[in-house]
Amino acid sequence: MVDMPRARQARLRTGNALATRGRVVACLAIGACLTLVACSQGDFDQRLRADIEETRQTAFTLINSNPQPGLAIYGSASSGGLISNARVTLYPINPDGTINRDPAAILGNSITRGDGQGANELAPTSDFTESSGDAVFVATMRKAYRGPVIVELTPTTAAATSSNVAFPALGMSFPRESLQASDALLGYAIDYPYGRNARSVSPLTTLVVERALFLGGISSGNLNLASRQVGAFFGLDEVRAQTPHSLMSEREAGDRGDSLQTDLALAIVSQLARETGARQADVWRALTLDIRDDGELNGTSGLIPGTGSVLPSLARANYVTTQLLNDYLDDNNAENLSGIVLSDATDGSLLLDRLTYLDTARTMAGTTLELLEANLERYHIGLIPGQETDLGVRGFSRIEGPRIEGTRIQIVTTDGPTVANLSAISEDPSVAQITSDGRVRIPDTALPGTSTLIRISLAADGIHLTGSFSTELVLRVTVASP
């Protein structure tokens, strides 16, 4: 038995011979995917796959290569207002769930457009038809790739003007703040080429990426589980559920709809910078370091970079609303250009509900999902000698909440690290092997026309995924002719 780092949670056990079919000989973490299958405009990502409903045992898919380049990753960027002229870089994910930052591996580049217009020219989405105060980008993939894509925003010198971001907490006196060389925000497209919308890259999505890394590594599942956990911490159903509206222009709380929750979360981050005398980007960095050490925003990372201020705990009671939002939303605060004010927090209002919730003690680890069912994306696959692919496991749950009640979600897939307990055993490793990173590989010496079964077990880990559900899934692998 070979254990991977404990933080990865998952254990994938592999067998390489019929004689040792019931014995575990290797283990590793493999991926999960929280993908919302039912959604409405402005809600969660959809994962559209031609074979997503194919469950027949006789289904056969010959996998020849990764999806070809040429499609675009698209989205927007917001700090509570425009992020203008930022360089957009697309990074692939390594099999172990780390971000591949090798310059030779970069998948694409672009620059955010500060006018908030133009994405519809290339991106098949309606997310940008309503002015949201976001800058937009479209970046064409220049390499063949399949899986999650990390979107990084950094300063650029290529634009006519400097890279800069809105500063909502100082909307009147210091509305724009320049980005410096080490500043960065992270976002993601959940599953290229099926999920290409990076939604709104922001300080919140940066925390999602860091939380996913804490959970064991980047995968569709860990990103979406992290998005649910970070979102719940800030009073959201999920971080990318609603595109934010700008805090730099007046729109009253009652006119913001469900985006009010996202807008308040971005206001918290900006106001924290104002009250500690820090640059916003230095607060982003401090929060990133805070979540990196123990997965929580509990103020354990020390000082905010570039300042003498200690990073406070956003998790403690009587801080986020009492100390931050009450100041920002004060009716007499001239720096607040958003139109959201405390006098709007009337009985029964969404604003009062969110302000009350945000002043309670909260943790990210306290948000769990119940594993309810599972299947395979395809039950019979064909690979030529030397090829490999993921196991195609899918596990499902449902989210129950005031705005997303009964939403069916996909919380386990085998595209990277996962918090689920999974094991896989090949009945004949001379035909199909399980690699050290949990993928199916056909040996170079395998004979075309031969086939074998891979038996996969799945269960909740009891920490992030709960419930008593467990199952065994059987994948048939056939060796195809080159």
Image: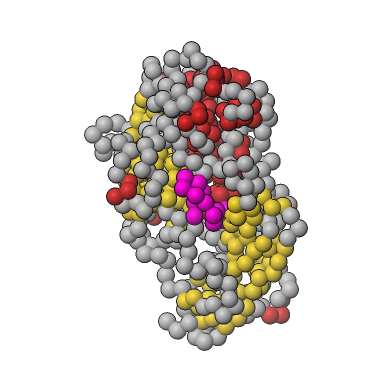
Residue found at x 31% / y 52%: 122
Residue 468 pos. (x, y %): 76, 58
Secondary structure mainly formed by the magenta segment: loop
Vertical relation: 106 (above or below) 427: above
Residue 120 pos. (x, y %): 32, 48
Residue 389 pos. (x, y %): 51, 68
User: In terms of depth relative to the viewer, which is nearer, 418 or 232?
Assistant: 232
Residue 441 pos. (x, y %): 53, 72
User: In terms of depth relative to the viewer, which is nearer, 148 or 216?
Assistant: 148
Q: Residue furthest right?
A: 468
Report the span colored magenta.
33-46
Q: Is residue 218 visible?
A: no
Q: Residue furthest left?
A: 160
Vertical relation: 33 (above or below) 277: below
Q: Residue furthest top?
A: 332
Vertical relation: 442 (above or below) 447: above
Residue found at x 40% / y 65%: 67
Picture quadrant of residue 164: top left
Residue found at x 62% / y 47%: 405
Q: How many marks?
A: 0
User: In terms of depth relative to the viewer, which is nearer, 311 or 395?
Assistant: 395
Q: Is residue 387 visible?
A: yes
